[in-house]
Image (tube, rainbow, N blue to C red):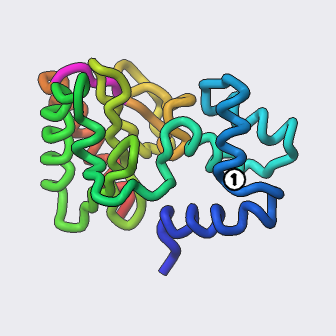
Amino acid sequence: MAASPEDMARSMIANMPEKTGKPLGDWVAIVKASGLEKHGEMVRLLKTEHGMTHGFANLVAHEARGGVVSAPAAGTDLLDAQYAGAKAGLRPIYEALTGAATGFGDDVELAPKKAYVSLRRAKQFGLIQPSTKTRVDLGLNLKGVAPAGRLEASGSFNAMCTHRVRLEGVDVVDAEVIAWLKRAYDAAG
């Protein structure tokens, strides 16, 4: 069986000092000190100025933007932390999406990370991230599907997805959104 994304990330983190000369925390500090905010800019900095391979640069950029690969603090409920405070009102959007996804089959796994929840079966088919106080982003893996309307290319949102749908209310989690989610689920089987 292939290693999970988390296993691969842990392996890369363990090998980072040997392969890049510094541990993950040092690289994250370098990126944060640069003042860059966009994922692609961070990757470019690490590759061009520090000679890092794309895989390591991508991992560092993800960590710098939200700590998606680091272990949570002991006793922290990642999901509750994502939807705390000003983002609490977004939880119904999350519930609607996960309710639909888990209805597709008993093989759906919800894997909370620090900044988002990964939706997986044989492989990741989507993710749900409360991106702002007013919006949840649904990331989808829909290779070969042209962006159109609300289904946009993921761009710098998340390198682990091909598309993104911006959701600012539970009312916009409609049949069209559920159909895209189901298509991504079907493709991951």
Q: Is residue 41 visible?
A: yes
Q: Measuring from the top left, give residue 137's x and y in whole percent.
A: 35, 30
Q: Quadrant of residue 45?
A: top right
Magenta stretch mostly in which secondary structure?
Answer: strand
Q: Is 38 above or below relative to 159? A: above
Q: Is 172 above or below relative to 61? A: above
Q: Is residue 136 left or right of residue 37?
A: left
Q: Quadrant of the C terminus?
A: bottom left
- Name the residue: 17% across, 34% down: 91
SS for tag 1? helix
Nearer to us in this view, 141 or 3: 3
Q: Measuring from the top left, give residue 101's x and y in whole percent.
A: 20, 50
Residue picked out by circle 1: 55
Q: Is residue 56 left or right of residue 154?
A: right
Three-letter code for the amino acid on which mark 1 is drawn? Gly
Q: Measuring from the top left, give residue 97's x and y in whole percent.
A: 20, 41
Name of the residue lying farthest toward the front: 74
Q: Is residue 175 visible?
A: no
Does residue 167 show up magenta in the picture? Answer: yes
Q: Which residues are magenta?
A: 165-169
Nearer to us in this view, 41 or 103: 41
Q: Measuring from the top left, give residue 168's x and y in whole percent.
A: 24, 20
Q: Residues within 10 Å of mark 1 (few under 14, many from 20)?
A: few
